[in-house]
Amino acid sequence: MKPFIFGIGITLLAVLGIYLWIGQQAKSEQVEVNSSIIREQINNVGKLVVVEGNYSQVLNYKNTRQNYLRIFPASKKALVIINSKVTVSYDMRLLQTEVDENSRSVIIHSIPEEEVNIYPEIEYYDISQDYFNQFTAADYNKIKTTVHQIIEEKVNQSDLKERARANFIAELQRIYLLTSTMGWTLVYNDRPIESEEILLNLK
């Protein structure tokens, strides 16, 4: 009788072991499937988040040079029309992430910084210049620098950067929703991202 009971016990232990092994394998396969899906979705995140704006400006450029003991001033001036396209972008290819299967977490190591690009189209009208004070390359370079500063100030006063960041955060929200749906955790700077509101304050 004892050998029979002993045999049943061995059989039950074997069945239990096989059951646990199958369960562990299934769990491992599920984690691998989830991590593969997450990696694929991260790769599918928009490669470049771009917001465009257009700005126009009229600039009166004037320069006067005093010659011959300040008796004969020489002047030059021009009407400068500026039409500029501006882009504010985030290169999502610079988003560095790590998928940790052991802790079931997606770790963001670094996020891209915003890139502001200004593409001015400058047209000159009503150019007048005296013989002793004519336009040179230095004048045109000075005008370009001034134009860049003016447009940059306009961008800072507009909502262009805020709109670009909102689109950038929207891409991160896609990753957050995916990880939270699968029971994974999104981590940045050793801090779990537990709500979409936290994403708004990422730096």
Image (cartoon, grey):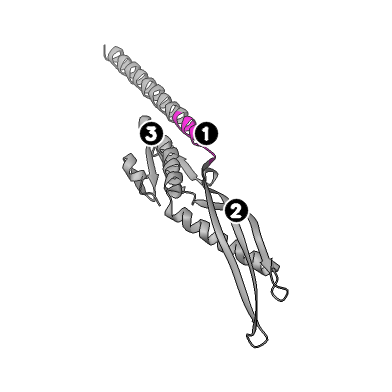
- Whether residue 133 sits left or right of residue 169 in the image: it is right
The residue that mark 3 highlights is 177
- The foreground one among 162 and 155 is 155
For marks 3 and 2, give the one nearer the viewer.
2
| Position above or below: 44 against 82 | above
Q: Is residue 84 magenta?
A: no
The residue that mark 2 highlights is 120
- Give yes or no for contact between labels 2 and 1 (Cβ–Cβ under 8 Å): no
Mark 3 and mark 2: Cα distance apart in space: 39 Å
Q: Is residue 41 magenta?
A: yes
- The foreground one among 80 and 153 is 80
Amino acid carrying label 1: it is: Asn
The residue that mark 1 highlights is 44
Res 24 label: none
- Whether residue 132 sits left or right of residue 43 in the image: it is right
Mark 1 neighbour density, 10 Å: few (under 14) some (14–19) many (20 or more)? few
Q: Which region of the structure is painted magenta? A: 34-48
